[in-house]
Image (spheres, rainbow, N blue to C red):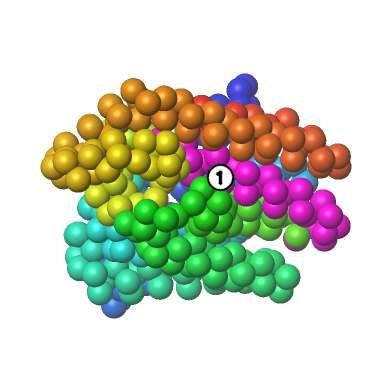
Amino acid sequence: MKTFKDLIGFIRREVNKGIENIPIPEKPKYLYDPIRYSLKGNGKRFRPILAHLVGRANKIDPDVIMNISLSVELLHNFTLIHDDIMDKDSVRHGQKTIHEKWDKSSAILAGDGVFALSQIILSSVNNNVMSAYFNSATLEICEGQALDKEFENNEKITESQYLEMIDKKTGALLSLSAILGPIYCGIDKEVISHYDDFGRNIGRGFQIHDDLLEITSNQDLMGKSLGSDLAEGKQTFMVIVARNLFPKQWKEIITGSTPVDLVKNSKLFFDEKGILETTRLKAESYFESARENLKQIKSIDTDELLKFTNLIEKRTF
């Protein structure tokens, strides 16, 4: 590949081909049509790309890398399908969410089916330790989603509680993407912990940056509904900072804005008070921690993983 961008494009295309080649039955259509539809979405594939890069660095067999990558991407899709139901989102990956196109029952069942497919694909690698980590990460993601729902409209949530939530909801899957390959290789647990820390710091930076893009980007670029976090009373980093530093003014924004104006008014407030910049710097600090984690992994060339970190940090979508 001439450039790292070319490599990322190549991996994304290979992952898309792998997803297209997953054998999905035709019947019952009530189950498999929504599953097939969900996998056609224009996802960014960050997690399987990370799994691929770690696999390349550890010189893992390409077929094993692909199965690991597909399993984490399907796990991600499972969480998104259910997350969209819970958050009442209408757009994901540039298309209608499953519960909008069909109904909630179809979406719940499709999510369950996608999770089952992720397990089937991972089982082809035939590694019980990997399966144990996979299932543990899945439960942790569910815990993170539960905390996210519990935190809605709770004005007592602290920054540390928020960080615990995103560690589980976002960091666990990025960690899993980083550690499955090394686990397959039988790498020492201490080194595995560096991959784990790397993935979790990427997760923290990614989620805080994603909260920022929820306010500053647009639906076409992001490929998903925007503004639902504020409407649902989600406790994001920006909301917590605003509430802590400017409690009276922030309360006026929340209570005095119509649903249509809430995002616009919040963005103006966050910008005026320097909260957008504070949030950007907070995300940067975790990406820098991820780069420090890579320095602890001495057995591989981490150059591509470093470039991946920089790519995620600078994303605008």
Residue lying at 48% horizontally and 73% vertically, measured from the top left: 116
> Disc 1 designates what residue?
204
Q: Residue at (19%, 45%) from the top-left corner?
A: 255
Given the current orientation, which residue lies at the most extreme front position? 248
Label the magenta part by its dominant secondary structure.
helix
Describe the element under mark 1 as helix, strand or loop.
helix
Q: Picture coordinates of residue 310 (x, y %)?
A: 59, 29
Residue nearest the viewer, comparing 217 with 118: 217
In the depicted structure, whether residue 302 falls above or below residue 225: above
Residue 34 placement (x, y as % from top left): 29, 64
The type of residue carrying mark 1 is Arg
Split into 4 quadrants, where in the image is the N terminus? top right
Instruction: Verify whether residue 192 appears in magenta.
Output: yes
Query: In the figure, residue 193 lies in which quadrant?
Result: bottom right
Q: Quadrant of the C terminus?
A: top left
Give whichever of 181, 255 is nearer the camera.
255
Q: Is residue 199 left or right of residue 147?
A: right
- Looking at this view, name the residue that lies furthest to the bottom: 28
Does residue 81 appear in the picture of this structure? no
Left or right: 265, with 272 as reference point: left
User: Which quadrant of the figure has residue 53?
Assistant: top right
Q: Nearer the viewer, residue 306 or 16?
A: 306
Region in magenta: 184-212
Question: For the residue carrying disc 1, how many other residues have a C-alpha within 10 Å: few (<14), some (14-19), or many (20+)?
Answer: many
Q: Is residue 270 above or below residue 23?
A: above
Q: Is residue 235 magenta?
A: no
